[in-house]
């Protein structure tokens, strides 16, 4: 079916902790690999990106017994594709999937919670760098998947300091976790966003845009489209397993307590 060209409304930007919502079905299609894809007018499912994995869960087609199991979520040109498989298909499949039908979305809570903790822990490490004397490191790439999360920074740390900095960074992060600090996310005018991010934004943020800024308490924020914990104490604890520094880059490997 023809896909709607309007961008998908990202409801998780307004409420990062909402796990159930309703939406309108705009389109459905079958991909070459056999997977079905649903396109909705809005979604609380996070599409993979920014170093954070996609949400999973299911979508119920209102007024029917059809359940769509969401296995992956991706964003293409502002349109979010919910990929997965149908369950409980009946003879009136096409009728029950009529465009304009209301659907109910259910996000898998344990996966969302883990992904949010992993992602938030990466932001926490950013805040802790200056506190342990690593002010010169600049944020780079991040990988917040559970199989081996890390954050990468531009700049290096002397080999002789790596082990001590690893211990200091972990201690500082866990101290903030124990204290508990609220996490906020707001879509702001460019100048206001820049002010809350220490006076400037990365070059990839267009100056005419209204970026979404995530902040941990009163610490400088950063532009981010991901999901996060509501309070930094929800991370429970963080283990900095290793710091590697070479070729102008420093990579911090970490994990969160179960």
Image (tube, rainbow, N blue to C red):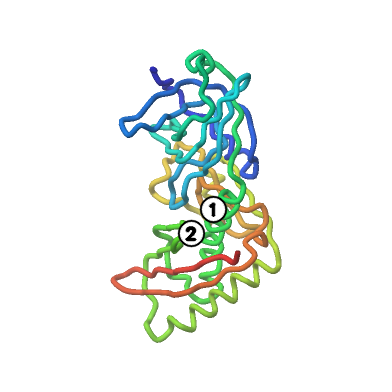
Q: Circle 2 sits in a helix, a strand or a loop, which is it?
A: loop
> Residue 199 at x, y = what percent?
51, 54
Q: Disc 2 marks which residue?
A: 146
Q: Which mark is residue 220?
A: none
- Residue name at image x 49 percent, y 78 percent: 166
Q: Position of residue 5 (x, y in %)?
A: 41, 22
161 relative position to 88: left or right: left
Residue bearing the label numbered 1: 115
Q: Is residue 166 left or right of residue 152?
A: right
Q: Secondary structure at mark 1?
A: helix
Residue at the far right in the pictured view? 179
Q: Considering the image in quadrants, where does the N terminus appear?
A: top left
At a point 47% along the width and 52% down the height, the residue shown is 200
Q: From mark 2 to mark 1, how far is it between C-alphas?
A: 8 Å
C-beta proximity under 8 Å, tags 2 and 1: yes
Precedes in sequence: disc 2 or disc 1: 1
């Amino acid at each position: 079916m023809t896909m709607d060209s309007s961008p998908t409304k990202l409801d998780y930007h307004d409420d990062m902790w909402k796990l159930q919502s309703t939406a309108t079905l705009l389109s459905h299609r079958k991909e070459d690999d056999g997977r079905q894809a649903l396109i909705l007018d809005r979604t609380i499912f996070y599409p993979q990106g920014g170093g954070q994995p996609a949400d999973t869960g299911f979508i119920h087609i209102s007024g029917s017994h059809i359940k769509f199991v969401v296995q992956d979520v991706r964003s293409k040109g502002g349109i979010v594709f919910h990929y997965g498989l149908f369950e409980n298909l009946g003879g009136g499949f096409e009728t029950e999937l009529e465009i304009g039908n209301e659907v109910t979305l259910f996000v898998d809570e344990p996966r969302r919670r883990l992904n949010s903790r992993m992602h938030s822990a990466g932001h926490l490490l950013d805040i802790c760098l200056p506190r342990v004397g690593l002010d010169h490191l600049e944020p780079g790439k991040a990988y917040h998947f559970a199989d081996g999360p890390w954050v990468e920074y531009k700049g290096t740390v002397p080999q002789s300091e790596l082990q001590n900095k690893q211990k200091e960074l972990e201690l500082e992060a866990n101290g903030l976790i124990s204290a508990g600090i609220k996490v906020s996310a707001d879509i702001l005018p460019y100048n206001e966003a820049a002010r809350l991010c220490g006076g400037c934004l990365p070059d990839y943020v267009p100056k005419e845009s209204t970026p979404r800024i995530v902040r941990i308490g009163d610490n400088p924020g950063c532009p981010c489209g991901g999901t996060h914990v509501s309070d930094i104490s929800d991370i429970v604890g963080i283990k900095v397993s290793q710091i590697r520094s070479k070729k102008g880059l420093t990579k911090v490997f970490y994990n969160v307590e179960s």
